[in-house]
Amino acid sequence: NTAMKTYRGVGIVMLLVLGGVALYLLSGGVIGGAGYTNEALGFSFDYRTGPNGYVLQEAKAQVGTKTDFVTNIVLTGTKELAAFREQAEAREGPPTIGVMVFKNSQNLFPEEWAKENRTYSNIDLVVGDQVEMEVDGAKAVRYIVDGLYRLDTVVVAEKNYIYVFTGALVEGDSPIEKDFEPFLESVRFVDRQ
């Protein structure tokens, strides 16, 4: 009987450990992670949730607007967003990870689009060099802009869209600075319907 209880206890512990490992792997290697997928816009990404993670908010273009803007997705730290909402006095918002999506109606390369759309790309505020790169196989340009916050900015051209990914760099050791690279690595472009 004692041996049977021991085996049963070990079995339960093993199931819990394996279940936790499976959950970790299914969440993209991010404990407490979530995923965002937009099949119509052809992309997805993973982000961390919970008290030490992020809250996702999305603002879509108004129907009938005459612009190439499609949507703006903002990931704000859970704690930072709560503190901001509790603040009575007006101040700038907390630093964020952002994704703006635009129609690429002129089929421009990332750097060309950034120069044509300076308001959204902040290309005039670049500090340092621009680097050509790829995000999930799509052509991209990456640079740092200096404004209210320094922004690590990645402009991606994929099929009929431009994706502008930004991560606010507040301090050398900020959570966003640590999370922006894994966030970018999680971005996937999928077939559009």
Image (tube, helix red, strand yellow):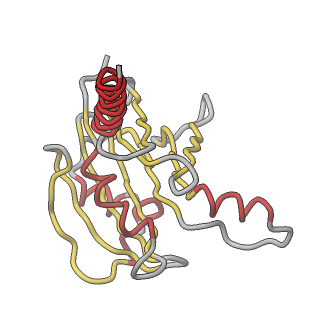
Q: Where is residue 158 shown, x and y percent of the image?
A: 24, 40
The residue drawn where x is 40% and y is 46% is: 31
List the single residue furthest toward the right: 88
Residue 28 in which image quadrant: top left
Camera-nearest residue between 11 and 22 = 11
The residue drawn where x is 24% and y is 50% is: 185
Image-based side of 179 in relation to 147, left or right: left
Residue 176 in which image quadrant: bottom left
- The C terminus sits in image quarter: top left
Numbered-mark total: 0
List the single residue furthest toward the top: 193
Image-based side of 117 in relation to 108, left or right: right
Camera-nearest residue between 142 and 161 = 142
Q: Where is residue 64 shown, x and y percent of the image?
A: 60, 29
The residue drawn where x is 36% and y is 67% is: 178
Camera-nearest residue between 159 and 137 = 137
The residue drawn where x is 34% and y is 78% is: 126
Residue 186 in which image quadrant: top left
